[in-house]
Image (cartoon, rainbow, N blue to C red):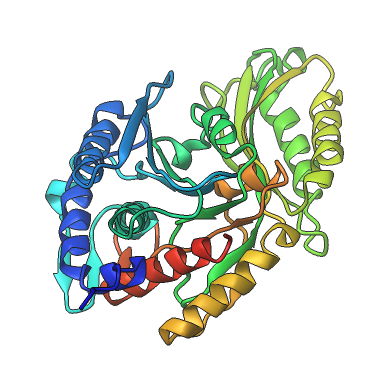
Amino acid sequence: MTTSPITAVDWLASRRGEMEALLEAIVNIDSPSADPAGTNAVAEVLAEFLRRPGIAVERIPVAGAGDVLKATVAGGSGAPVILMGHRDTVFPNGTAAKRPFTRRGDVATGPGVTDMKSGVVSGCFVLAALAAAGGAPFPVTAIFTADEEVGSTASHAEIERTAKGARAVLNLEPGRASGNVVKARKGGAAVEIEIAGKAAHSGSAPQNGRSAIEALARKIVRLHALTDYETGITANVGVIAGGTVRNMVAPWAKAELDLRFVESAQWPDLLARVEAILAADDVPGTTATWSVGAIFRPLEEKMSCDLLARYRTAAASLGFAVDGEFSGGCADSGFTASLGIPSLCGLGPVGDHSHTEREYSRLDTLVPRAQAVALTLLSLA
C-alpha cells in the first residue's frame, strides 16, 4: 500500500495553531517603518521559520529601511509567481508592550495584526506548504519589505527587480472586512510644498510684507479644486504650517499634499496641473518650491481580472465565496501591475480597522485564505 503525496492544501489544513503562534511572535515585535532594527527583528523570526523546511532565504540591505527579505521554493522551469507583503507598521516603538497580541475567540488584535503581519504569516505558510508538497511547477518567491507604510521608497526598486518577468503577483495585504479581495487600487503621490515670503510688522507696515500663508491658502483652494470624483482623482492638503507670530506677516509656510488617481495615464497630466498651480505668482514677492516624494502606481482592474477568477474558483472549492473590491488605498501591487504583470491584492486573512487601536484579524480565515492562495498560484501552471 502506498501513501499519496501530501498536497499544499492538505498540509495547511492543520496549521492554524502554528500560524497563530508565528503571528503572535511578530505582532509582539515593534516594527515601525522608521526602525530598521525592529523590522529586521521581524525578518529574522520569519527567516528562522522558513529555513527549517529548507526554503532558500535571502536578506537584501536597502538604504534607509530594514532589509528586504526574500524566500524561494524551487520548482520547474519558467516564470515564477511572486508573493508580496510588508513587515513594517504605522505604530511607534512601545506599542506592542502597551497592547500586545491578544486572542479572543476567532479574533486577534495587536499592532499590525492585519496590516499586514497576518498576511506575511500566510505567505510564509504557503511557501512551507509548497515545500512540504515537493515544490511547485515553477519557482515561487516571497518578498517581504520594510517600508511600504511610508511609500516603499527604499524597496520598490527591489520589488520591481524581483517581479520583472513573473507570471503573476499575489499581494497578501489584508482581506476586506466583507471577506472580499482587492481587484483595483488607486495610485498616489505625496508632494511637499514650501512657500517663502517676506516678514513685516502686521500693524505698522503690513504693506512691506509678502505673506507666505496667503500664497499657500490661495494655492490650496486651487489644488483642492483638482478633485474630480467621476474620474477618481483627489487632491488633499492634509498638513499645513506657517508663520512665526500673530503680529508678523508670515515669511514662510509649508504643506503636505496627497494626490490619488486610478489610472497610470492620469498621472502626467495631474502632476503638470499641480506644478502649474504651485508655480503661479499668487502673491507677488513670494516663491514656492516643492518636491514629489513617494509615488505609488495604481492597480488597474484589467491587471487582476484573470487572477480574480482563479481565486474565486479556488475559494469556491474550499467552501467560501469571494468577490473583488476597489480600494482608494495604495499598495505595492501597483508597482507590479504597472510593469504589465497580472497582480491581485488583499489576499491575506480577513481584518479591518488598519492603522487604529481597533485593528483586528479574523483567525478563522488564516487557513482557508492561505489555501486559496496556494490553489490560485498552482492553477497558473
Residue 332's place in the image compared with 213, above or below, is below
Residue 289 spot, x, y in % from top left: 71, 19
Residue 27's place in the image compared with 347, above or below, is above
- Residue 161 vs residue 347: left or right? right
- Residue 312 vs residue 6: left or right? right
In this rendering, does residue 197 appear at all?
Answer: yes
For image coordinates 55% across by 59% down, the residue present is 345
In this rendering, does residue 326 appear at all?
Answer: no
User: In this figure, what is the number of numbered marks?
Assistant: 0
Q: In the rendered image, which quarter is residue 185 located in?
A: bottom right
- Residue 90 vs residue 50: left or right? right
Residue 323 spot, x, y in % from top left: 58, 78
Residue 66's place in the image compared with 381, above or below, is above
Q: In the rendered image, which quarter is residue 332 located in?
A: top right
Residue 100 spot, x, y in % from top left: 15, 55
Q: In the rendered image, which quarter is residue 381 located in?
A: bottom right
- Residue 195 vs residue 61: left or right? right
For image coordinates 36% across by 57% down, the residue present is 130
For image coordinates 52% across by 74% down, the residue present is 180
Residue 310 spot, x, y in % from top left: 59, 71
For image coordinates 61% across by 69% down, the residue present is 308
